[in-house]
Amino acid sequence: MAAPWRDVVRDAAAVREAAAVAVDAALLAGVLMRTGEQPRASDVVNYAPFTLLPSAVPRALFEQAYAVQQDFNLLVDAISRNKEFLEQTLASTIKVDDFTARLFRIYMQVLEEGLAQTVFLGINRSDYMFDCGVDGTAALKQIEINTIAASFGGLTSRTADVHRLVLKVLGKTEEASRLLPNNPSKGLALGIAKAWELYGSQSAVVMFLVEEIQRNIFDQRCVELELWNRNIRVIRKRFRDVFEKGSLDDTRRLYIDGQEVAVVYYREGYVPQTYDQQNWEARLLLERSRAVKCPDIATQLAGTKKVQQELSRPGTLEKLLPGHPEAVARVRATFAGLYSLDEGEEGDKIAATAIADPERFVLKPQREGGGNNLYGEELRQVLEKIKDSPERTSYILMDKIKPQPALNYLLRAHSPLQVSECISELGIFGVYVRQGQEMVLNKAAGHLLRTKAIEHADGGVAAGVAVLDTPYVV
Ligand code: ADP
Ligand code: MG
């Protein structure tokens, strides 16, 4: 891939000057996070980590990622409505993975009772890396799709301005003018507002379901402010609040503190540690309600790694998206090799291959949020240990994507300024709203570029590895 900043990246004085401007510009623009030391305080904040320089992204791959997003929206929605597919796909997983099993139990319980919800809102982010082939050409390969609590659509709306300024400081005014506008928070809010409107109660609120400790609150506030601008009332509650004060009326309208809730936007609820018995009960209450859940539990299950792996089987996409051969082809073109570790010959074979050559693969459990995957020697050891046990089934294997690194500086509070070899992950935000059988909104809502130093196998900004970036489309 092109290295557009070759002439400045090693110029220590220029880099130092640009970094000082960049940090102040990030603070001014609101690229903020609460600090690790005082994660509950908004009066002690710092900038969210970001790259000094925007990273080069090949235009064709950038456009390909946007072009396939509506297809992914349709696909996720189709999976969420396909009980047979979810049941079959997750059957082996829920025998060994307690967290997925509990989600699945709620899913079945809600279906048995009959859905009260009639309006559906999906906000997802499909993440990709640029795999570098032997001939040096890069290909767009999906890492995963996040169907719950996909974050950084807010903060990333503000990073392009910072990078534009940095380029100007470095004497690259013409390049600065080429950075694309990007505002996912507006697009996400548009979807939430549409769902709120279709729910059809002027006095009902949008509830952000948030974590106990909310370090990334400013990212959420960006979306929240867009809703207030549309005169839609937003409240922020935790599972615990729902357990204590939430209730359903006899038509399963959801109330909390006496307020009717039209939309529940989850920014929490995707890791097992969130749930004690009370919080599971709160989750069930929300899922049973008429409120628009973003996502509903079926859509959360559609985002599991096991589902991702099953999608790559020949014929599966065709079944899920009948009559859409072009969408199927666009989606499939982004898939890397994905392999089931279910018990049986197929799983035995790929497990043996991965043990023999662990550098080729990533071993993934059914977890979200970064820091859970296994690589290299650790992958080999774990797989060796579980290869003959049913526990193997709770993981999937994926081909490791190998992008071409580029030099950049990762700006982090209290960290020295040093050059790193970096790789990037591009995310495209998708938003859709369905009322009954009819898709009323289906959009790509913007992008997120995250960049990390190559010595980290796993990623994630919240996990402290990756940082915010802006694509410089070449
Ligand atoms: P999570 O749900 O924890 O975000 P991901 O599948 O996105 O799980 O993996 C986390 C990180 O691990 C990614 O952001 C990426 O940096 C790295 N990663 C995941 N899959 C691959 C892969 N196939 N090849 C290379 N890196 C990967
Ligand atoms: Mg991820």
Image (cartoon, helix red, strand yellow):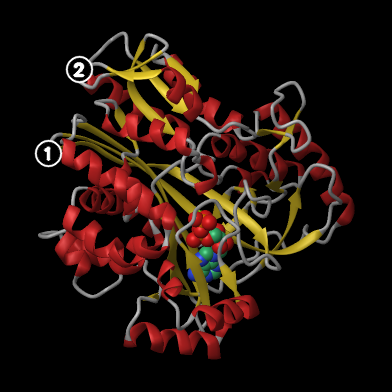
Callouts 2 and 1 close, C-beta under 8 Å: no
Point 27% across, 73% down: residue: 313
Which residue occupies the foreground of this view, 402 or 115?
115
- Neighbour class for label 1 at 10 Å: few (<14), some, many (≥20)? few
Which residue occupies the foreground of this view, 6 or 429?
429
For label 2, being within 8 Å of ligand 1 is answered no
Which numbered disc flags the more N-terminal residue, 2 or 1? Answer: 2
- Tell me: residue 266, above or below residue 364: above
User: Alpha carbon of mark 2 to alpha carbon of mark 1: how far?
Assistant: 25 Å
- Neighbour class for label 2 at 10 Å: few (<14), some, many (≥20)? few
- Residue under numbered circle 1: 437
The picture places residue 281, in percent across and down from the top left corner, at 39, 33
Is residue 238 at least partly visible in the picture? no
User: What amino acid type should be assigned to the residue bearing mark 1?
Assistant: Gln
Say whether residue 341 is left or right of residue 214.
Answer: left
The picture places residue 300, in percent across and down from the top left corner, at 36, 47
- Residue under numbered circle 2: 250
The residue at the far right in this view is 13
The picture places residue 387, in percent across and down from the top left corner, at 48, 82
- Tell me: residue 355, above or below residue 119: below
Q: In which quarter of the image is residue 421?
A: bottom right
For label 1, being within 8 Å of ligand 1 is answered no
Say whether residue 9 is left or right of residue 80.
Answer: right
Is residue 89 at least partly visible in the picture? yes
